[in-house]
């Protein structure tokens, strides 16, 4: 009886846990031109299968995709249209200790509610 499968030349043994590194896929220059560039328009084009997987993919895909997308849309809309933003530390340097690059400063900001925003 076979106790492993072979994927891309690698033996995956029975019982192993395999972690798919979604960030690595999302930042792969073979899939995304200038992956570190903020460019939401890149998603106007259809994506290659399995190249954008924040919600997983296949039969166990996240059941809350639509709810999560809608919640984020409302949250980001209110956050960006209802407040004046001040970035308290403009240091643009990135920290890459983990596989998720983030600003060294942690990007502290101050938000002040705008009077006419209805918030
Ligand atoms: C930004 C928000 C969310 C993200 C990034 C997210 C991401 C994920 C990911 C990566 C999985 C695993 C998919 C896989 O195994 O291939 C998952 C599963 C799941 N998510 Fe979400 N999720 C989010 C919000 C939600 C919400 C709001 C709900 C429900 C209201 C939800 C319900 C579920 C359920 C039930 C599963 C298990 C599906 C299954 O195993 O068949 N998620 N989610």
Image (cartoon, helix red, strand yellow):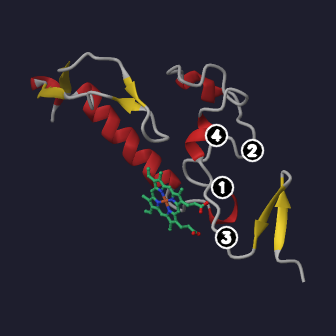
Q: Which residue is mark 2?
A: 49
Question: Mark 4 or mark 1: which is in front?
Answer: 4
Residue 94 x, y percent position in the rendering: 39, 25
- Judged left or right of residue 103, residue 116 is left
- The numbered mark at residue 25 is 4
Instruction: Tell whether circle 3 marks a residue whose Cβ is less than 8 angstroms from ligand 1.
Output: no
CB under 8 Å between callouts 1 and 3? Answer: no
Residue 85 x, y percent position in the rendering: 20, 22
The Cα atoms of the two marked residues, 2 and 3, are separated by: 25 Å
- Residue at 27% in and 32% down: 106
**Regarding mark 4 in the picture, which secondary structure is present there?**
helix
- The numbered mark at residue 16 is 3
Looking at the rendered image, the quarter that the C terminus falls into is top left
Closest to the observer: 71 or 21?
21
Question: Mark 1 or mark 3: which is in front?
Answer: 3
Q: Which residue is mark 1?
A: 57
**Regarding mark 1 in the picture, which secondary structure is present there?**
loop
First in sequence, mark 1 or 3: give its number: 3
- Judged left or right of residue 76, residue 12 is right
- Judged left or right of residue 50, residue 87 is left
CB under 8 Å between callouts 4 and 2? Answer: no
The Cα atoms of the two marked residues, 4 and 2, are separated by: 12 Å
């Amino acid at each position: 009886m076979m106790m492993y499968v072979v994927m891309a030349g690698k033996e995956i043994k029975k019982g192993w846990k395999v972690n798919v590194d979604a960030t690595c896929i999302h930042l792969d220059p073979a899939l995304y031109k200038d992956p570190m560039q903020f460019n939401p328009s890149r998603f106007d084009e259809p994506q290659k299968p399995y190249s954008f997987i924040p919600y997983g993919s296949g039969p166990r895909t996240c059941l809350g995709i639509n709810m999560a997308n809608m919640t984020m849309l409302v949250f980001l809309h209110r956050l960006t249209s209802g407040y004046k933003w001040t970035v308290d530390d403009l240091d643009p340097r990135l920290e890459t200790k983990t596989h998720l690059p983030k600003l060294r400063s942690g990007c502290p900001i101050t938000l002040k509610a705008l009077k006419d925003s209805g918030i």
